Image (cartoon, rainbow, N blue to C red):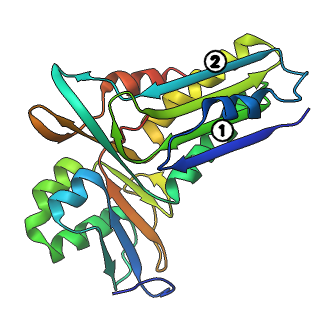
Amino acid sequence: MSCFGDKSLIKVLFFAHLKERLGCDSLMLKAAPATVAEVRQQILEMHPNWRDDFESLAKLSAVNQTICDDNQLVETGDEVAFFPPVTGG
Amino acid sequence: MRQENLIQVQHDDFDISALYHFLQADNVEDGAVATFLGAVRAKNLGDNVTGLTLEHYPGMTEKSLNDIVVQARERWDINRVVIVHRVGALQLGDNIVFVGVTSPHRGNAFDACEFMMDFLKTRAPFWKKESTSEGDRWIEARDSDAQKASQW
């Protein structure tokens, strides 16, 4: 499903080890969670078997490509990403 | 004084002399050029590394590198800045990252170069997966890198 341009959805991305373990690089949320914590909760309600990998690997989050904490507000049309600690350089 | 940035994320190798040229050409204001080059090394955690793959978050990567340069400019009197980081499959000895910065004096250039590398390692969304004699594995973030970045 292509989600680009649909402002009524929240686009969620996964990277690296987390993406590999979930076997999924992205999904769309139709409801509008208010915070990153609620996005996490909603994803785990959809995929209860992701809980362990999420807890161990989704250590960092970003909203609209800026790193943030779980209290960050999320609105429809936003891009939310979850990923493990970064290891570039 | 002209402040210029060259920030790139790319699969291909980079030409160090061309990057140095960007920093130094027609630049008589700056007496200092500090550079850092990171390359793929053969040993990690006691295992023989045969290569690595770098994943990144397109869009956020460029944004975070830009943010790091903006922060460096707020803290030090620096002029030209280069950050080039490779992604994709890399072999032993391959270049991974180049950071270069110019300044009238060496103190600012050294500090800004180290700051940008420390922040890149802890904030820019790159992930390394290495192939070793024991199989493939994602590299774990190191506490020492986080500690080093927190000192700035």
Foreground of the two, B43 or A60 = B43
Question: Quick one: label 1, few (<14), some, or many (20+) residues within 10 Å?
Answer: many
Image location of residue A88, percent across then percent down: 40, 38
Image location of residue A42, percent across then percent down: 24, 73
Which quarter shows the C terminus of chain B?
Answer: top right
Foreground of the two, B143 or B58 = B58
Q: Is residue B36 left or right of residue B29?
A: left
Above or below — where is A58 with respect to B50? below
Q: Is residue A54 left or right of residue A65?
A: left
Q: Disc 2 designates what residue? A: B111
Q: Is residue B106 left or right of residue B142?
A: right
Above or below — where is B11 with respect to B15? below
**Quick one: label 1 or label 2, which is nearer the N terminus?**
1
Foreground of the two, B10 or A7 = B10
Image location of residue B74, percent across then percent down: 73, 33
What kind of element bears circle 2?
helix
What kind of element bears circle 1?
helix
Q: Residue at x 57, y 21 (%)?
A: B114
- Tag 1 and tag 2 share a subunit: yes
| In contact (CB < 8 Å): disc 1 and disc 2 | no
Q: Residue at x 36, y 29 (%)?
A: B40
Chain letter of disc 1 in the image: B
Q: Quadrant of residue B106?
A: top right
Q: Is residue B130 left or right of residue B2?
A: left
Q: Disc 1 designates what residue? A: B69
- How many tags in the picture? 2
Image location of residue B91, percent across then percent down: 33, 36
Gap in Å between the C-alphas at discs 1 and 2?
Answer: 13 Å
